Image (cartoon, coloured by chain):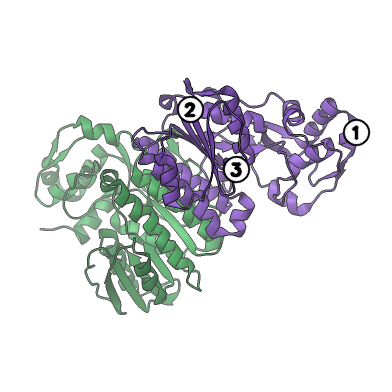
Chain colours: A purple, B green
Amino acid sequence: MRIIITGGGGMLGQKLARLLATRGRLRGQEISHMVLADIVDPKPIEAGFPVACRKLDITDRAAIDALLSEGVDVIFHLAAIVSGQSEAEFDLGLNVNFFGSYNVFEAARAMPNCPRVVFTSSMAVYGGEIPESIVDWTCLNPQTSYGAEKAAAELLLTDYSRRGFLDGVGLRLPTISIRPGKPNKAASSFMSSIFREPLQGQEAVCPVGPDYPHFYLSPRRCVENLAHAAEVEAAALGMNRCFVLPGRIHMIGDMVEAMRRVAGDAPVKLIRWERDPEVEQIVLGWKAFILPAKALKLGFVADADFEDNLRYFLEEDIER
Amino acid sequence: MRIIITGGGGMLGQKLARLLATRGRLRGQEISHMVLADIVDPKPIEAGFPVACRKLDITDRAAIDALLSEGVDVIFHLAAIVSGQSEAEFDLGLNVNFFGSYNVFEAARAMPNCPRVVFTSSMAVYGGEIPESIVDWTCLNPQTSYGAEKAAAELLLTDYSRRGFLDGVGLRLPTISIRPGKPNKAASSFMSSIFREPLQGQEAVCPVGPDYPHFYLSPRRCVENLAHAAEVEAAALGMNRCFVLPGRIHMIGDMVEAMRRVAGDAPVKLIRWERDPEVEQIVLGWKAFILPAKALKLGFVADADFEDNLRYFLEEDIER
């Protein structure tokens, strides 16, 4: 069982690699080899099998072909230019998120063994003129270039799978919270930072009201779902290989109360409530009401409660 | 008003060019120049303005850049590899239908005047696990490579429009009937040939029963809708530039009775009813129940009745 993770240096790539290292097995087989590939040198991972780190650019077709030609059974294709940067640098986003994915899919197609390709898509594929509640057959009408590139790559993944070029599974990730690390300029940054910073003893600003609803998944549950995606039977995936992962719809106020239950009053007091009309204008356009029926039927799972998200952060990611 | 038609040598391209030649105006301006571009030399068109014919391959980025750099206000991008061939020759279909469209959109983006780009997509973007009735927010789940390539190009068209790179309108065409010419190997070929051949005094085989329902548009109404797409206000198009054109849902038996009303009993007697399970298996998978609310609101129109389709064929296309 040979595994490649693109974006293997990123937050999810590293957590996924550590999960696979702990498990040692995937699809009923022992993992014999894993490659973490990223645009910057990925941090090495301790494992009971060899783990190689490769610095490469997925827009370089020859580099991707060479990477896969060493042999691969499961590719986790996580590498991407994030939403904000794809909006600011259109050609870069299109080249990495669409043409880079095409390169990965073509390299997989060239393999004799029809590898499983687990691709991370995004809720950003939804938007525009769609009903309030998103179901498995709601159209993709992205309102960012990032979403458009992910949606177009999804279409290729399903078609390549239908043709037997590869065996794809595309997962639209809910907003991941609590992300470790630093706040960033994404409009969604507060959805992690108002918990992460206070739990680390620092102030954070909440730019929306306590009744703002959104759809969340913890990093830990997310990578467990990525591993599950490598194992789910192709026959069960049906005619669309891409679907939204389960998450939980929470209101900000309820999430803050969950933090109070898990960590007491002190961190809650470090949140400054300052509504920011600019942020609200963006995030109120995002869809929160998602019915991930297909994913649930396939055995993907959400967190039980936001208290889980908080506990996972305290266990795995807190910087003191 | 400078116009380019890719696929200008094809059936719809030629009819559109003749319509524009007759009208002489588009978007309230006199047409000053038109180019018909195609992979084979397009047939010249008589018009009161200069019409150039160009033989070129849209997968050749430099050729497309050169074509547009002469100046253009409206591009009708009709060039495509058809469904059957895209399924048989995957790389050719992807290169023309997706990468060729990308070339056209990029060339349009390079123009200073944000040209209107009218793109022909297809009902083939629908399929798979969707409800029986297709509405404007039904997801695209194509089950052919042709459909996947058109759907991916649609996503680019909407995103390029949102960013102001071009001003796009994508139309998903119903099945065009009655097509002039010869029968072909498409599973849908009978949907024209059981009328065209009998009206031309020849036998034709109907491989489905009289109760088979499907969604149709005449070639004449189709090119009128393409011209309308060049004129509809960008502000009215909303957040998804691509939508299904209006058509009519007819059952084969009703269409045959329409032919009896328009042309008498003789052609009807030239239809041989021989059910073909192979054809039925394909065409019964196609969706017939379409609610094209957005297109109707924007002023696109269906044929009044299948008798219209028959009359247009007798007026424009019959070969005696």
State left or right for residue B2 relative to residue A227: left
Residues behind callouts 2 and 1 on a single chain? yes
Question: In which quadrant of the rendered view does residue B188 lie?
Answer: top left
Where disc 1 sits, the SS reads helix
A293 or B175: nearer the viewer: A293
Q: Is residue B320 above or below residue A131?
A: below
At which x and y percent is residue B161?
52, 60
Question: Residue A32: which numbered mark, if any?
Answer: 2
CA separation in Å, label 3 and label 1? 36 Å
The residue that mark 1 highlights is A266
Residue at position x 21%, y 69% from top? B43
Residue at position x 86%, y 42% from top? A202
At which x and y percent is residue B16?
31, 64
Task: Pick the quarter of the image with the N terminus of chain A.
Answer: top left
The type of residue carrying mark 3 is Pro
Residue at position x 39%, y 53% from top? B98
Task: Pick the quarter of the image with the C terminus of chain A.
Answer: top right
Q: Residues within 10 Å of mark 1 (few under 14, many from 20)?
A: few
Q: Is residue A205 visible?
A: yes
Front position among marks 2 and 1: 2
Question: In which quadrant of the rendered view does residue B100 lie?
Answer: bottom left
Sequence-first tag of 2 and 3:
2
State left or right for residue B11 relative to residue B143: left
Q: Which residue is situated farthest in the top direction here?
A: A28
Q: Residues within 10 Å of mark 2 (few under 14, many from 20)?
A: some
At which x and y percent is residue B39?
26, 63
Sequence-first tag of 2 and 1:
2
The type of residue carrying mark 2 is Ser
The type of residue carrying mark 1 is Ala
State left or right for residue B26 relative to residue B204: right
The residue that mark 3 highlights is A42
Q: Residues within 10 Å of mark 3 (few under 14, many from 20)?
A: many
